[in-house]
Image (cartoon, helix red, strand yellow):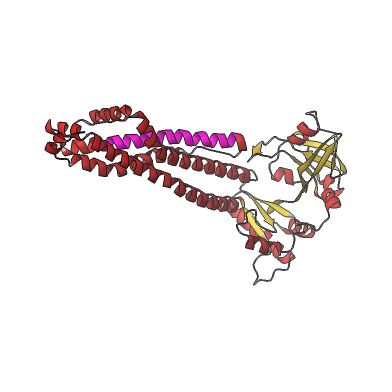
Amino acid sequence: MEFKEAIKIALQSLWANKLRTILTLLGVVIGVASVIAVVTLVNGANVYVASKVNKYGADVFTMSKQPQIITSYEQYRAFQKRKNILLEDYRYVAENCKHCTEIGAQQTVTGKIVSGTHSSTDTIIRGQTWAMPEMQNLNVVQGRGFTPTDDEHASRVALVGSDIQENLLGGDDPIGKEIRVDGVPYTIIGLGEKQGKTLGQSQDNWVAVPLSAFQKTYGTSKSLTLYAKAGAGAESLEMASDEARQLLRSQRHDSPAQPDSFTLETSDTFVGLWKSISSSFEAVAVAIAGISLVVGGIVIMNIMLVSVTERTREIGVRKALGAKRQDILTQFLIESATMALAGGAIGVIGGMGVAQVVTVLLGFPSAIAVWSIFAGLMVSTSVGIFFGVYPARKAAELDPIVALRADY
């Protein structure tokens, strides 16, 4: 029997029992759709995190009281016991780090912004040294950024995100307008570029003010995050980060035998840690989704066994007409593989659709990984072949005389 003819017979058999075929495919469809949706969402999150971290540049590193990602409560408690990084620490490193081309510092709180009769109560308020917006690659699309003079004189000037312009200022030109940041008046001098939403959370609901003005309102005891920029090249980054580490250790009186009382992170450190966490999550989710594939395979095997029983006389006729064991085996394997491949194709489309719905409703980033599409189709087909072997062998081993005598 030609391979093309075997495929044709397999499709005819599946089409003749459409409802049974659809119900049989559900397990495979759910399994593949789950895998594709998880991989697409995790891949999207990886791309998003990498782009957001890399916007600071590969030559930027941070020093903070605790890392950006904490994986356990015990770690959190240990990091909270560390001393805060204060303004004098920032000044000491800024004055003495020879391999650092720029150094900035930032603090953040959540507060209330008021403009006329409009207000916002969950706005991120950033206290920044004058170089910070540039180090974070913040594009000021209107007005200007901070200057050293703003920092030195604790000027009450502010940069704002597009949410402040749209929701509090009615979309008008914000430059020169006055807003109150937790009751303190500031004049808007710049508007940041719109960044959109992530996980349903707006990235444009923020106000940035000079760090010196920020600390007049919120005090100087809160911990700073230091941002440092090295020259181009991995060697410059290593030299700058090593020098900054030693300077901060010296300023904080860390003894040689003690570990750092702060966390130094580069973009590679953060992205690597995130990918480690996301890959673990992805592996667990895929393993759970794989259970659906196994269940779907068992259902396929069960249906194929029923099909063999129903078509016993047909198998006997074909064997009597000269069909070989290999022909019968191939026919039934093609049927089970075709069934699973169809389920895999539907699952791939469904998984990508689910991921897109999550992105639209929740703002969670998604990015289709091409390899996952081929992997989903290959795995589903493999499941169909694996679980179709036993029914196919059973059909191939039927005695034609016995099969012709069967009354089905």
Please name the predominant secondary structure of the magenta segment in the image: helix
At a point 57% along the width and 53% down the height, the residue shown is 273
Q: Quadrant of residue 193?
A: top right
Q: Nearer the viewer, residue 29 or 373?
A: 29
Relative vertical location of residue 350 with respect to residue 97 in this rendering, above or below: above
* Percent of width and height locating residue 44: 55, 41
Q: Quadrant of the C terminus?
A: top left
Indicate the position of residue 225 as horizontal and vertical percent values. Answer: 72, 54
Magenta span covers which residues? 332-360
Q: Residue at x 69, y 40 (%)?
A: 203
100 to 184, vertically: above or below: below
Left or right: where does residue 313 sit relative to residue 227? Answer: left
- Residue under the point 15% across and 31% down: 317
- Asked whether 393 or 71 is in front, the reply is 393
Q: Does 214 appear in magenta?
A: no
Q: Tell me the quarter of the picture where residue 115 sits.
A: top right
**Residue 84 screen position, x and y as percent:** 75, 61
In the image, is 402 to the left or to the right of 117? left
User: Residue 306: which quarter of the image?
Assistant: top left
Number of labels in the image equals 0
Whether residue 355 is in magenta: the answer is yes
Residue 64, compared with residue 182, is above or below; it is below
